[in-house]
Image (spheres, rainbow, N blue to C red):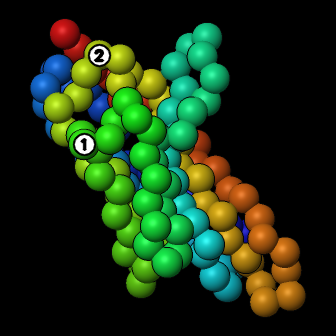
Amino acid sequence: QVQVVESGGGLVQAGGSLRLSCAASGTIFSINAMGWYRQAPGKQRELVAEITNPGTTNYADSVKDRFTISRDNAENRVALQMNSLKPEDTAVYYCKVVLRPRILSGVREYWGQGTQVTVSS
């Protein structure tokens, strides 16, 4: 069993900052990638940022130069530092983990429960 636990969401004024954190635990042989997605009501879930095991990062154009994703491999944790927040960043943010539970298992995808980020004007 794998658990994905997020923290750090909340309310913030425009121009402020938040730091989201996500930790994966349980039966984990290896992690291929971790990332953050967000979804606003009536909109599709979209990629915000991701980081692979080799350390390659990928950002949505809308957050590039404002958000930074980082990973602590020893703790199976990923963080998203969000600066210069805008009202359009308001959404539920989800952590996604791509991992192999056991050496003989296939690669599987796990999601956190989501954490609300609200940016006021």
- Reading the image, the residue beneath label 2 is 87
Q: Quadrant of residue 113?
A: top right
| Residue 76 relative to residue 29: left or right | left
Residue mark closest to the camera, 1 vs 2: 1
Quadrant position of the C terminus in the picture: top left
Name the residue nearer the viewer: 48 or 2.
48
- Reading the image, the residue beneath label 1 is 65
Q: Earlier in the sequence, mark 1 or mark 2?
A: 1
Q: Is residue 85 above or below residue 114?
A: above
Image coordinates of residue 37 in percent, x first then y, are: 53, 40
How many neighbours does mark 2 have within 10 angstroms: few (below 14), some (14-19), or many (20 or more)?
some
Q: Is residue 77 above or below residue 14?
A: below
| Residue 48 relative to residue 96: left or right | left
Image coordinates of residue 120 in percent, x first then y, are: 23, 14
| Residue for point 24% across, 40% down | 66
Quadrant position of the N terminus in the picture: bottom right
Q: Secondary structure at mark 1?
A: loop
Q: Is residue 114 above or below residue 51?
A: above
| Residue for point 13% across, 26% down | 15
Query: Distance from label 1 to label 2 (Cα)?
Result: 17 Å
- In the drawing, what numbered circle is on residue 31? none
Determine if residue 77 is in view: no
